[in-house]
Image (cartoon, helix red, strand yellow):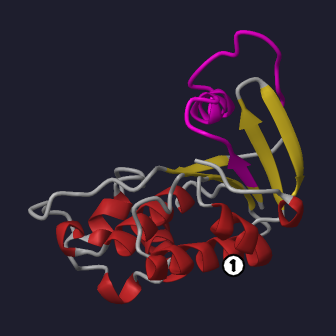
Amino acid sequence: MTALLGPNGTGKTTLINILMNLLVPTSGSFEFDKGVKLGYVPQFRNIDAEYPLSIKSFVSLNAPLIKTKAVKEEIEHELEETNLLDIKNTRMGEASGGQKQRAYLAQALLDKPNMIILDEATASLDPVAKEELMKLISHLNEEHKMTVLFVTHDVPLARKYMDEYLYLNHGTIKQGKMSEFEGDYE
């Protein structure tokens, strides 16, 4: 459970894009251990109130086109894992911000990642929704041994849930225990 911290413009998004092989580094290199499979949860994006897909259909967009029994069972499992099973038929446009964000997480979990990148996934969520999402992320880390990289500006939330930090600040990099991170930043 690592927080990726730093002011805007310091390279957090660039680093994420490099880790996801969407950008090639201009210098240096990195290598994941064999077997690392990434999942990605984007920053909260509001979905129009008229958006017609149900939560289940939205999550299913990340599943194979042919929905075998096993695929359907996996979709149901991820809806249950993200506490969306009871509201799976609710239209995404009618879901709360926290429910929508958990649907993005369920989508990512269909790929069976063992590392998940949360790209400011709690930004714009109310305090209750933030806590629900972070408790779910903690569960995935503890029970499913999932590595978590949490990009955030919410230092108090990171202090509560993250073990380590990586702090980028205009050419400098610091890392350490989240409990020892000093200060807040904007």
* Vertical side of 153 occupied by 9: above or below: above
* Vertical side of 133 occupied by 150: above or below: above
Magenta residue span: 3-31
Badge 1 element: helix
Q: Residue furthest bottom?
A: 86
Residue in the image at 46% along x and 59% along y: 123
Image spot of residue 153 (x, y percent): 59, 53
Give left or right: position of 113 versus 165. Answer: left
Residue in the image at 72% along x and 72% along y: 161
Residue 82 in view (yes/no): yes
Q: Amino acid at mark 1?
A: His
In terms of secondary structure, what is the magenta stretch mainly?
loop
Image spot of residue 106 (x, y percent): 48, 66
**To which residue does mark 1 refer?**
139
Image spot of residue 48 (x, y percent): 16, 58
Viewer-closest of 2 and 18: 2
* Vertical side of 39 occupied by 130: above or below: below
Viewer-closest of 87 and 93: 93
Asked if the stretch drawn in magenta spans residue 13, the answer is: yes
